[in-house]
């Protein structure tokens, strides 16, 4: 879709959503400027070099095979998914101080593992508990629009109406909720859980999990920045949006005021910041309008990312492991395929729900993680942690409380020249990398559609 005119667009936020939006607009020939407050692009999905010159990530990132728009973006910028990712066709579960199980997840790429995993692993998940998970298939096969009805219920409420299997809840659904949106099953909208099941079921061939080959800064964000700059996009890093200037007379945005005082004027303004950064910047006259009032009300959840370097090998798996009965619900060993580390294992662990641990000091958090993972890996007790990085994300994602998912705003706002992009705007992949790319793409399409309606001619 080529636009009829070419208004100047300024995008605040150089995360996946802002960059995906910039890409579609630049592809359509619009002049675009991206403002990013940090030195590195990529936001929450970003990586950065620490004081030792080692790549560190904002947090462990899993790439679901169903991430179609993110895969397309990678192909477009000349970084096909096979170069950026390695695929795994199984998922390991460990119960803290209990049994473990590995389930094949793709009937086409790993038919035997998928069949044997489903028939076996009975000490982890008994036959009745496995059968109790079948109802996940029915609502998950409904169209997206109908799934929204489940936004009234939490996962626990929905599960109580559907099944009596406590084992399936504790060993599969709860770790999944904690790992995927960093929120517990009692606070987790059933729409969100069923949405993930739906997206996987409608693309059975894509039921795979991708791990990254290397730092995303090098494998994705640097090539994406080059792609954008070659198409005339101006990228300004270490430049923060301070204020959104609203003109009450025209009912339009009049400029982005930057930290430092510069007033940047454009025709179209895109906010690709997290909702919690945008909320305090919503201009006063707009705050009472229902569209913006809903944004002020969106709940957020914290998460803690813990990265640990060991003096020896403590796990031998490159894939993802979910842990039941622990608030370290997911981890991955990065030492072989992501950030090669010859001495031993390098684990990336997510701590969630993190609310209670946010006030703990780093040493206590690391001790907690070692105790929880050590229950399944006795080698951890004898190993030495030679380096650790603990990143506390006070706001990580929109907490998927019932009602919050359907309250997410659309990308076009009631203000004609203000648009939103982000993993927290309406799209089918909730808070995720794919959600951010979809939010950015939907934002760009809304702008091009407005251009073609003649708004700026
Ligand atoms: C610890 C952790 C683990 C995760 N794990 C996964 C996973 O396994 N799989 C998955 O799919 N997703 C995962 N996610 C979610 C995923 O990273 C996000 O959904 C996605 O990156 C959000 O992209 P975004 O562009 O919407 O927002 P952001 O990435 O937050 O981008 C917003 C950008 O705006 C910038 N900014 C902020 N304030 C200003 C300002 N005033 N002016 C200018 N710029 C500003 C920020 O620096 C940032 O670059 C994880 C997130 C975290 C934090």
Image (tube, rainbow, N blue to C red):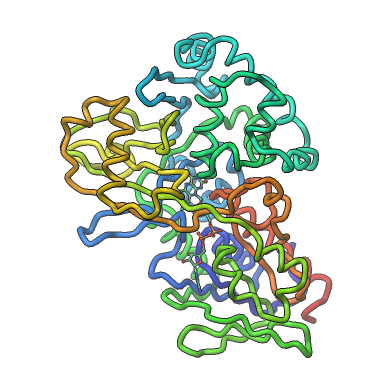
Vertical relation: 36 (above or below) 216: below
Quarter occupied by the C terminus: bottom right
Q: Is residue 2 visible?
A: no
Vertical relation: 51 (above or below) 109: below
Residue drawn at point x = 40 percent, y = 19 percent: 100
In the rendered picture of this protein, how many numbered marks are placed on residues?
0
Q: Position of residue 318 (x, y in %)?
A: 35, 32
Residue drawn at point x = 62 percent, y = 60 percent: 440
Residue 86's image quarter? top left
In this rendered view, identify the residue nearer to me: 233 or 415. 415
Q: Is residue 172 visible?
A: yes
Q: Is residue 404 left or right of residue 437?
A: right
Q: Is residue 310 left or right of residue 253?
A: left
Q: Position of residue 190 (x, y in %)?
A: 67, 37
Residue drawn at point x = 25 percent, y = 54 percent: 54
In this rendered view, identify the residue nearer to me: 115 or 232. 115
Quarter occupied by the N terminus: bottom right
Q: Pick out the residue farthest to the right.
A: 453
Residue drawn at point x = 23 percent, y = 31 percent: 380
Residue 325's image quarter? top left
In this rendered view, identify the residue nearer to me: 286 or 233. 286
Q: Position of residue 291 (x, y in %)?
A: 75, 66
Q: Is residue 91 left or right of residue 388?
A: right
Q: Position of residue 432 (x, y in %)?
A: 55, 48
């Amino acid at each position: 879709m080529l636009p009829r005119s070419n208004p100047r667009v300024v995008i605040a936020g150089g995360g996946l959503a802002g960059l995906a939006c910039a890409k579609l607009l630049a592809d359509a020939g619009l002049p675009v400027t991206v403002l990013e407050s940090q030195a590195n692009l990529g936001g929450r999905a970003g990586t950065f070099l620490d004081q030792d010159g080692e790549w560190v990530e904002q947090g462990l990132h899993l790439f679901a095979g169903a991430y179609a728009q993110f895969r397309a973006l990678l192909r477009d910028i000349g970084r096909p998914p096979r170069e950026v990712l390695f695929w795994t066709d199984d998922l390991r579960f460990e119960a803290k101080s209990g049994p473990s199980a590995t389930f094949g997840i793709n009937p086409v790429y790993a038919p035997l593992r998928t069949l044997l995993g489903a028939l076996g692993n009975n000490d982890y998940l008994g036959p009745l508990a496995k059968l109790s998970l079948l109802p996940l298939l029915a609502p998950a096969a409904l169209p997206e629009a109908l799934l929204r009805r489940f936004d009234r219920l939490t996962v626990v409420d929905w599960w109580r109406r559907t099944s009596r299997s406590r084992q399936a809840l504790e060993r599969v659904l709860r770790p999944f909720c904690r790992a995927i949106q960093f929120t517990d099953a009692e606070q987790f909208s059933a729409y969100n859980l069923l949405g993930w099941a739906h997206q996987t079921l409608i693309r059975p061939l894509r039921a795979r999990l991708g791990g990254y080959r290397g730092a995303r800064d090098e494998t994705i964000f640097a090539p994406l920045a080059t792609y954008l700059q070659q198409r005339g996009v101006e990228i300004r890093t270490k430049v923060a949006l301070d204020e959104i200037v609203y003109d009450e007379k025209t009912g339009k945005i009049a400029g982005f005021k930057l930290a430092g005082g510069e007033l940047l004027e454009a025709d179209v303004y895109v906010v690709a910041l997290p909702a919690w950064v945008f909320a305090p910047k919503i201009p006063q006259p707009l705050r009472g309008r229902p569209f913006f009032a809903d944004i002020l009300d969106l709940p957020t959840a914290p998460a803690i990312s813990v990265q640990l370097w060991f003096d020896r090998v403590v796990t031998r798996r490159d894939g993802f492991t979910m842990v039941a009965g622990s608030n370290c619900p997911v981890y991955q060993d990065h030492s072989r395929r992501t950030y090669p580390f010859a001495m031993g294992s390098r684990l990336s662990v997510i701590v969630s729900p993190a609310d209670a641990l946010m006030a703990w000091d780093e040493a206590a958090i690391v001790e907690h993680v070692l105790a929880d993972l050590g229950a399944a890996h006795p080698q951890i007790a004898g190993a030495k942690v030679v380096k650790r990085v603990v990143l506390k994300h006070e706001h990580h994602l929109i907490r998927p409380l019932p009602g919050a998912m359907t309250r997410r705003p659309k990308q076009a706002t009631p203000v004609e020249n203000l648009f939103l992009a982000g993993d927290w705007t309406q799209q089918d992949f909730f808070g995720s990398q794919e959600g951010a790319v979809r939010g950015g793409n939907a934002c760009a399409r809304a702008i091009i559609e407005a251009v073609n309606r003649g708004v700026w001619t």
